[in-house]
Image (tube, rainbow, N blue to C red):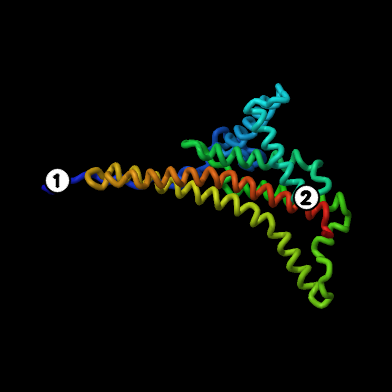
Amino acid sequence: MAAPTGGTQGVSMPDPIHQFEINRIIPIKIFGWDASFTNSSLFMVIAAVLTVGFIMVSMSGRSLVPNRMQSVSEISYEFIANMMRDAIGEGWQKYFPYVFSLFIFIFVCNMLGMIPGFFTVTSHIAVTAALALLVFTSVILIGFANNGLGFLKLFVPSGVPAVILPLIVLIEVISFLSRPLSHSIRLFANMLAGHITLKVFGGFVVMLLGAGGAVSLISPLPILAAVALTSLEVLVAFLQAYVFTMLTCMYLSDALHPGH
């Protein structure tokens, strides 16, 4: 007969990748293509509804002395307006609704992902790539619509010697075509890495508490680290929405003023 084993059974580390799993809520097939309504779709809808609902409610009873909700809306408006005014210059007003919607949608999606048990939409490259391609396509359309073939001046910097001009043009074209890649990966990678780190430190807490004995005495250390990381991740959620929007403004500036 085997001797009974003593001691406390260890607790395994929770899977930090499980939180990013896509789950079908309503299976949908369109001509053989999977167009199911998933948890990712659900949280994008929630983000859109929360954004539209907040703006409508906060601005429904506008007054000279704003309440808290109206103040938040006005501060958000001024924040994006100042960013566009500085980055784009003349003609920024026409594209304000587009840029403002991008910023608020990404920020709300990022913040929803901070709530335990909720899904982080922007931690999936498919979502961030779609947003980046939307910006990329918009820049091209706006560029040609406003400047015609003059938009191609973007790839021909002024003052470049003719000898190296072909090389510079090639570099500019490659740089332009790589914009969606860097634009999408920056947001995706930061949100993914942050949530994995939070999950790992949360797993340490569970493992140390489950170990029992003297080991459980050091469990407050990863708790404190998780709290600090959560605060940092809230800041990152805002910064990544800001960076994505700022890059969008810079790209729109290129589309409106390609020769500058």
Q: Which residue lies furthest to the top in this view?
A: 61
- Residue 78 image-quadrant placement: top right
**Measured from the top left, where is residue 131 in percent x and y?**
67, 46
- Who's the residue at 30% across and 47% down the image? 218
Q: Where is residue 200 in the image (x, y as percent from the top left)?
A: 41, 48
Q: What is the number of the mark on residue 170?
A: none
Residue found farthest to the front: 65
**Local SS, label 1:** loop
The residue wearing badge 1 is: 4
Comparing 50 with 8, the one in front is 50
Name the amino acid type tagged 1: Pro
As drawn, 163 above or below 124: below
Q: How far apart are marks 2 and 1 (CA)?
A: 73 Å
Q: Which amino acid does label 2 sit on?
A: Ile
Give how far across and how far down residue 10 sits, in percent: 27, 46
The disc at residue 88 is 2
User: Tag 1 or tag 2, which sits nearer the N-term?
Assistant: 1
